[in-house]
Image (cartoon, coloured by chain):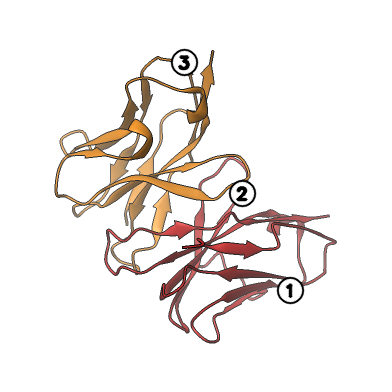
Chain colours: A red, B orange
Amino acid sequence: DTGVSQDPRHKITKRGQNVTFRCDPISEHNRLYWYRQTLGQGPEFLTYFQNEAQLEKSRLLSDRFSAERPKGSFSTLEIQRTEQGDSAMYLCASSLEFGPTETQYFGPGTRLLVL
Amino acid sequence: AQSVTQLGSHVSVSEGALVLLRCNYSSSVPPYLFWYVQYPNQGLQLLLKYTSAATLVKGINGFEAEFKKSETSFHLTKPSAHMSDAAEYFCAVSDLESFQKLVFGTGTRLLVSP
């Protein structure tokens, strides 16, 4: 069990540039979540996949954000035309169970800084 | 919708002292509650979770939490703090209306002094 991995761990970009983050969930986990965490706050839900289907998107996810999970394994989160307000830690989590008591396993996160 | 409130953004204790981190929930249905810990530059790690099987839940690293419906609380405790417990702690509730996404509190940073 190698855990959830995320790449890159850190990203510095200039305002207006596009960035893409990758998440590799724990093998065989069919559920995958993206959260965003800003300084001094808890993580906030962005979007959720069951296998390759994106089943829910938060209102936090503006049209500049897009997420994919093409083969039901790894996922990517792309932010187009980045803004300074996008600076945050982006966390990915995966789970295998189904139900309200499922355990979500989190990756180390990608810290984004938009200059 | 479910939500949690963590009282105290920072808690300071001495090594060996009792740790108490507070979490109150708001839910119209029986909640499913979680405590996660985040060490610097790392992701979140599950400490324990309440699944309605028992009101006193034991977790990893000597932590435990008690679900009290009458007080709508799920406070996290540890009898004796270690320096290695210094981290950020998040209480979370499972959003039953929305594919079990987690709704987190704002977190409590635990500081442990020698």
Q: Which residue is mark 3?
A: B15
Q: Is residue A101 above or below residue A57?
A: above
Q: Chain of mark 1?
A: A
Alpha-carbon span between mark 3 and mark 2? 29 Å
Alpha-carbon span between mark 3 and mark 1? 47 Å
Question: Neighbour class for label 1 at 10 Å: few (<14), some, many (≥20)?
Answer: some
Q: Is residue A30 visible?
A: yes
Q: Residue at x 27, y 66 (%)?
A: A99
- Identify the amino acid type marked 1: Gln
Q: Of discs 3 and 2, which sits in the foreground?
A: 3
Q: Position of residue B41 (x, y in %)?
A: 63, 45
Q: Give me the disc on residue A38.
A: 2
Q: Which residue is mark 1?
A: A80
Q: Is residue B9 visible?
A: no
Q: Position of residue A70 (x, y in %)?
A: 55, 86
- Identify the amino acid type marked 3: Glu
Q: Residue at x 52, y 62 (%)?
A: A4
Image marks 3 and 2: residues in contact by CB distance under 8 Å: no
